[in-house]
Amino acid sequence: MRNLWIFVSKYNAFFLFLIFEVSALVIYIKYNSFQKATFINSSNQLTGNLYARINEFYGYLSLKKVNDGLARENAQLRNQLKSSFYIDTIKKHKVTDTVYKQQYEYIVARVINNSVNRSNNYLTLNKGSNDGVTKGMGVICSKGIVGKVVYVSAHFAVVQSLLHKDSQFSAMLARNKDIGYVEWGDDINPRKCVLKDVSNNAQPRIGEWVVTSGYSLFPEGIPIGKVSSLHIKGGGYSLNMEVAISVDFSTLEYVDVVENKFAGEHSGLEAQQKKDE
């Protein structure tokens, strides 16, 4: 307290000047309408800018919550898509009473680890068997297919990315539905893959969409990318073509794990067929 009193006594002239200066400004603004209006407008603008910055700051802090909510909503909307259902008819051959039943469901997950520059790339998700994720499920995002689940623990799952030398997924040209399959190219480019074994009768076009066929882990029509080149060697009696991948794997944050309710029945039936052969 004594040091404070010494400080004030030493600079008393400066503090008196401040007091008289502030008092003069208050009187000047209070009793002059133009200056008063100018001061109010300036203070309102300053306050508004300050509130805007504060709001932006709080908005930034809540981005994760907003993103989580949007991802959950996106998964719910996917569950309502027509492609997520199958048609259960009462009579064979002639449809008289059609009921849509759920075939695909989606589990939203966040990517917590990812690689894009290796020959075999994987992602780690923050959802596991406790959330309904099982080995063999497909994984997609808002822009297209991502890969398939290969390892699962109670709380996490590892996904074999499309950017993996062993990844192959059934695909087709969106325009005429010619079937083939996609796999990652040999040049380890995270933005390119190859559509192979398309019929020679197909007439693909540069820029045409390549989508899932519905024959594998994913519903029909999920984007894979666009045809970027028709001059890929090694096609033989079929066509191979380069595809520009629609997903930017380096920026992946949220994905949807696809649960195909008929996957077990489908794979079991095909395994029985191979056994009988």
Image (cartoon, grey):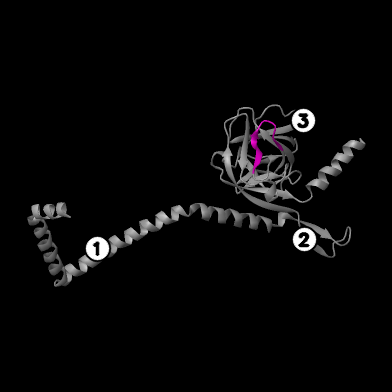
In this view of the protein, can residue 227 be seen by the observer?
no
Q: Name the residue that disc number 3 marks.
A: 237
Q: Nearer the viewer, mark 3 or mark 2?
A: 2
**Of pointers 2 and 1, the one earlier in the residue sequence:** 1
Q: Is residue 167 magenta?
A: yes
Which segment did they paint magenta?
A: 156-168
Q: Quadrant of residue 123?
A: top right
Residues tagged 3 and 1 counted as in contact (Cβ below 8 A):
no
Q: Residue 45 placed where, x, y %?
A: 29, 62
Give the residue at x 90% y 36%: 275
Q: How crowded is the residue under tag 2: few (<14 C-alpha within 10 Å), some, or many (20+)? A: few
How many labels sit on residues?
3
Q: Name the residue that disc number 1 marks.
A: 42
* Spatial separation of the CA atoms under disc 3 and disc 2: 40 Å
Disc 1 marks a residue whose amino acid type is Ser
* SS at badge 3: loop
Q: Residue 20 placed where, x, y %?
A: 10, 63
**Of pointers 3 and 1, the one earlier in the residue sequence:** 1
Identify the main secondary structure in magenta: strand
* Spatial separation of the CA atoms under disc 2 and disc 1: 62 Å
Work out which residue is located at the far right of the displayed protein and give it: 276
